[in-house]
Amino acid sequence: MSGRSEESLASEAARRRIELREARAALEDANRMLLGVFLRDRLRDPRDFDFAGGLAAVLDRRGAIVWTRVDALLTALLQDRPHLAAPEEPGPLRRGVSAIEFFTAET
């Protein structure tokens, strides 16, 4: 292979690595925001979910949130530390639940 072709391939590979890194960062930011929406009516401070393992503990291999893991970890966290729970608000729907239902609804 000529030096020019190798440089070209190396350049392309470097560009792809940067794109992949940026895409992973964007996915992590989106997941963090979505998890925060879900947790905001369940915990006084959604950052307290880090006591249960945080975002990394609820992601699958592809980087998608596994909501059954979130529920299980949240239940365990609130059993161990009930003072972290958000105060109950009256009303038929809680914002976190309705947001998650919106995002996961099948059409």
Image (tube, rainbow, N blue to C red):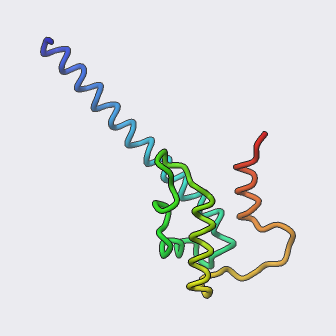
Q: Quadrant of the C terminus?
A: top right
**Relative to 65, is 76 above or below?**
below
Q: Which residue is at the far left? A: 3
Give the residue at x 22% y 26%: 10
Give the percent coordinates (x, y) of residue 105: 75, 47
- Kindly indicate the quadrant of the structure image that contains residue 86: bottom right
Q: Quadrant of the N terminus?
A: top left
In the displayed structure, does residue 99 sit left or right of residue 63?
Answer: right
Give the percent coordinates (x, y) of residue 60: 50, 51
Viewer-side residue, 62 vs 46 = 62
Q: Which residue is at the far bottom? A: 83
**Relative to 62, is 5 above or below?**
above
Give the residue at x 56% y 54%: 65
Give the residue at x 63% y 66%: 71
In the displayed structure, does residue 100 sit left or right of residue 53?
Answer: right
**Relative to 47, is 62 above or below?**
above
Q: How many discs mark residues in the rendered view?
A: 0
- Kindly indicate the quadrant of the structure image that contains residue 46: bottom right
Q: Which residue is at the far right? A: 92
**Relative to 46, is 101 above or below?**
above
Give the residue at x 52% y 60%: 58
- Kindly indicate the quadrant of the structure image that contains residue 81: bottom right
Viewer-side residue, 15 vs 58 = 58
Give the percent coordinates (x, y) of residue 23: 45, 41
Give the percent coordinates (x, y) of residue 55: 50, 62
